[in-house]
Amino acid sequence: MSTDTTRAPELTEEQELLQQTVRDYVRNHVAPHAAKYDEAESFPEIPWAKARELGLCAITIPEVHGGTAMGTVAASIVVEEVSRVCPSTAVTLSVHNSLVSSTIAKHANDAQRQRFLPNLASGEWLGAYCLSEAGAGTDASDQQTTAVRKGDRFVLNGAKLWITSGTHAGLFIVFARTSTAPDLAKRSRGVSCFIVERATKGVSIGKKEEKLGIRASPTTEVLLQDCEIPADNLIGELDKGFRIAMDALDVGRIGIASQALGIAQGCFDESLKYAKERRQFGRPIAEFQAIQWKLADMATGIDAARLLTRRAARMRDAGEPCAKEAAMAKLFASILANRTADEAVQIHGSAGYSREYLVERLFRDARITEIYEGTTEAQRMVIARALLG
């Protein structure tokens, strides 16, 4: 059972149909396999194959390039629904649709869109986003990967860390330094954005991280050694790629807010069901006020997170600046996901500590939502800057 407040704010008929399609997909093709992929720490092959078939890889891609052009709200719906059961599959879809496909759709030129988007829309290529480095986490401007122009080519060298889907990606959005900034305050001005195909000589996959959660989403190093790409693979203007990175993170944060929202909803659904079934002192534990208050707080927080997330997504679809709103949604939803997961385990008691129950996995998966696409602290920085002008 669910609170089923997912229609607030109201969805269009097309969005409601998508939501139901994704719920059916999750029930039939994700839920039966999620635990085994988590246990094996392996890529969710069956859910991904079905997602391709259903067009869930094409949500943010224009129809002319093989996409469905349903937009950010639709992508948010997909990620939320999948995250109720398998946040690993959800983040795979989120990065592909938001950080990669929407970035190319918005910032690339016509020739680049025609060349790369069809393979992303079909899911033949899975997209990965390469911004983070050993010294470039929250301070993403400190890029040490370099791209040097040689005639009609760029030669890339460097190492990218914490790359979602690195093992299976067919295309990478890569940020690299193309000029040396005169001082720290201006170093972001020397960063450029490139498209790098997996088959390119000099691209290799390094260490795969062993993680606490979202273990069915492979996270790796991506190594670039004398990697030559056509100069035509530059997205936007030379030395101005950092703006693209920050714009991509706005929509990426909406994706992670959606993931956190879905985790919270999944925890609530499982907790409500368990509280009605579990009996102590001769009655269901749902009849005890301590449990009722936990459920009430969960449901209230989920509604608030959904409103924040949908607002940011609608602003993005309308072409409105939404950095503050995306950060607010990601901040609130990620904190909520962790709090709700903690309460869900508590409601389940010792059962919540067992891998037999979904809340154990959601508890582990929730933690990353306060870290990637900008930490909780970074979101507060973004919000404060917007408020202070």
Image (spheres, rainbow, N blue to C red):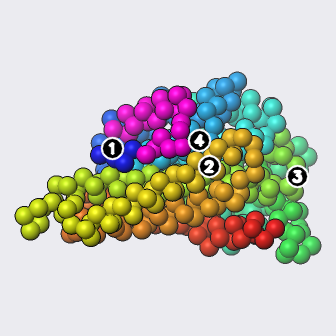
Cα separation, mark 2 vs mark 1, equals: 29 Å
Residue at the spot of label 1: 31
Disc 2, disc 1: CB below 8 Å?
no
Residue at the spot of label 3: 238
Magenta region includes residue 37:
no
What amino acid is found at the position of numbered circle 4 in the picture? Answer: Val
Disc 2, disc 3: CB below 8 Å?
no
Tell me which label, 2 or 4, sits earlier in the chain. Answer: 4
Q: Quadrant of residue 140?
A: bottom right
Q: Residues within 10 Å of mark 2 (few under 14, many from 20)?
A: some
Q: Nearer the viewer, mark 2 or mark 1?
A: 2
Residue 213 percent coordinates (x, y)? 42, 62
Tell me which label, 2 or 1, sits earlier in the chain. Answer: 1
Residue 170 percent coordinates (x, y)? 60, 42
Cα separation, mark 2 vs mark 3, equals: 33 Å
The secondary element bearing badge 1 is classed as: loop
At x 43%, y 46%, the residue is 5
Q: What secondary structure is the stretch in magenta mostly built from?
A: helix
174 or 139, which is in the foreground? 139
Magenta region includes residue 24:
yes
Q: Is residue 370 left or right of residue 288?
A: right
